Amino acid sequence: MKTTGVSRARSTWLLVGGLLLFMAFIIYRSLHVAGYQCTVCVDFRGQAACRKVEGATEHDALMGATNNACAFVAAGVTDSIACEHTQPTKADCAAIN
């Protein structure tokens, strides 16, 4: 059975359309994951940093903001761990609608 040019073109367009729908779904899900937004400020060894992060849960957003802020003020793994265990100077979280 031979495939005609029209049949092949139709299959190609269906495949391209399916891929575009899949890509749109992935982009939509990655942009709308957040349920909470947290702002965390840390003061570690005389340096301060504040970061705002969105996450699916309040705990995820809080930990993400803490890790992100510590990445700017700590040098090395040992400092990063020590920074993450210090009390933040500011930690505000709010649900995102």
Image (spheres, grey):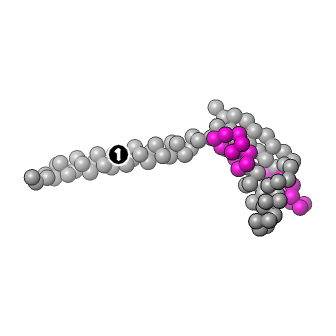
Q: Residue at x 45, y 44 (%)?
A: 24
Q: Residue at x 29, y 45 (%)?
A: 14
Q: Which residues are magenta?
A: 42-64
Of all residues shown, which one is farthest toward the top?
97
Q: Is residue 94 visible?
A: yes
- Tag 1: Cα neighbours inside 10 Å, few (<14), some, or many (≥20)? few
Q: Amino acid at mark 1?
A: Gly
Q: Position of residue 55 (x, y in %)?
A: 65, 43
Q: Which residue is mark 1?
A: 18
Q: Residue at x 86, y 58 (%)?
A: 44
Q: Nearer the viewer, residue 85 or 5?
A: 85
Q: Position of residue 4 (x, y in %)?
A: 13, 52
Of all residues shown, which one is farthest toward the left?
1
Q: Is residue 73 visible?
A: no
Q: Residue at x 82, y 57 (%)?
A: 83
Is 58 within the magenta? yes
50 displayed left or right of 22: right
Is 60 within the magenta? yes
Q: Nearer the viewer, residue 22 or 82?
A: 82
Q: Is residue 53 above or below residue 46?
A: above
Q: Position of residue 47 (x, y in %)?
A: 86, 60
The kind of secondary structure element at disc 1 is helix
Picture quadrant of residue 85: bottom right
Quarter of the C terminus within the rendering:
top right
